[in-house]
Image: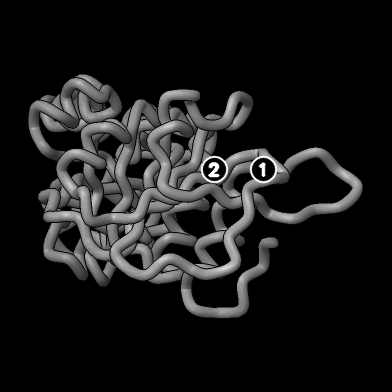
């Protein structure tokens, strides 16, 4: 059992709480057995840490409560944590979600789960919250290991993948889509408070607007999930 926060392994792993070290080493710190199981299933798990010996992880290292809390920087430490390799990026698939300056970790995590649920295999991060940060990772509940993650700007993606129809969610009641665009396509979602950049709006092939009543707008995670559901082949839920 490791009982000291000054342990060399603990010091090394805790660095992964910082983005620059995750990027440098290609590794990330994960919390919770569901994330450990997902990383293990994708052959990405390097090591695991537990508050008590775990039968599923016989080579795992047991930590004291104090050390686990120090490692994960949480008031209530998880019972299980680990280090996983960051998956290598692949070529964008036929259905892509682009997040432009989406900052809330909960929104990003929800959108990643919805992307996986509705057949979007690639998620592009354009100045959005780091998908490998602790809060986002917890929110994805393991979905991130089944997605292709890319980092690019909207113009950069459009240049690299000119065959994808660029569809943006835009708060404009004149924006209507009566026919679902054929694959390949990329759905672009903007910042929680400001939406899409003007330059991005001008570069879109189409815009969509989720029809709502009694309120002015929807949370980006809810709106994005509704649109992705519609694009999954079910009856469109927007006008």
Residue 17, labelled with which disc? none
Q: CA distance from mark 2 to mark 1?
A: 8 Å
Q: Is residue 132 above or below residue 194?
A: below
Where does the image place residue 141, in percent across and percent down from the top left?
Answer: 43, 57
195 vs 152, left or right, is: right
Where does the image place residue 122, in percent across and percent down from the top left?
Answer: 28, 56
Q: Nearer the viewer, residue 181 or 56?
A: 181
Task: Identify the residue shown where x is 15% and y is 29%.
Answer: 23
Please name the residue that numbered disc 2 is placed on.
107
Please name the residue that numbered disc 1 is placed on.
219
Where does the image place residue 66, in percent across and percent down from the top left?
Answer: 39, 31
Query: Residue 239 occupies which quadrant of the picture?
Result: bottom right
Asked whether residue 231 appears in the rendered view, the answer is yes
Task: Identify the residue shown where x is 21% and y is 70%.
Answer: 41
Q: Is residue 233 above or below residue 14?
A: below
Foreground label between 2 and 1: 1
Within 10 Å of disc 1 (Cα), the crowding (few <14, some 14-19, many 20+) is few
Kindly state the secondary structure of the residue where label 1 is placed: loop
Where does the image place residue 72, in percent across and percent down from the top left?
Answer: 37, 33
Quadrant in which the N terminus is drawn: top left
Query: Residue 18 occupies which quadrant of the picture?
Result: top left
Q: Tell me whether the residue at label 2 lies in contact with that at label 1, contact meaning CB atoms closer than 8 angstroms.
A: yes
Q: Nearer the viewer, residue 92 or 108?
A: 92
How many numbered markers are drawn? 2
């Amino acid at each position: 059992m490791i009982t000291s926060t000054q342990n060399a392994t603990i010091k090394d792993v805790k660095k992964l709480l910082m983005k620059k070290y995750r990027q440098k080493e290609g590794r990330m710190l994960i919390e919770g057995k569901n994330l450990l199981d997902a990383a293990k299933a994708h052959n990405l798990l390097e090591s695991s840490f537990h508050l008590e010996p775990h039968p599923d992880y016989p080579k795992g290292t047991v930590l004291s409560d104090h050390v686990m809390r120090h490692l994960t920087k949480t008031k209530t430490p998880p019972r299980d944590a680990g280090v996983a390799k960051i998956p290598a990026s692949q070529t964008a698939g036929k259905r892509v979600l682009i997040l432009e300056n989406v900052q809330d970790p909960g929104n990003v995590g929800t959108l990643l789960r919805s992307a996986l649920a509705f057949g979007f295999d690639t998620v592009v991060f354009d100045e959005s919250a780091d998908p490998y940060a602790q809060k986002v990772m917890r929110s994805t509940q393991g979905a991130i290991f089944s997605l292709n993650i890319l980092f690019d700007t909207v113009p950069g993606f459009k240049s690299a993948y000119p065959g994808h129809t660029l569809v943006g969610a835009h708060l404009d009641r004149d924006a209507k889509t009566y026919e679902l665009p054929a694959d390949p396509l990329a759905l672009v979602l903007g910042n929680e408070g400001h939406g899409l950049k003007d330059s991005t709006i001008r570069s879109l092939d189409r815009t969509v607007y989720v029809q709502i009543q009694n309120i002015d707008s929807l949370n980006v995670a809810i709106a994005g999930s509704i649109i992705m559901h519609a694009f999954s082949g079910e009856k469109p839920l927007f006008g």
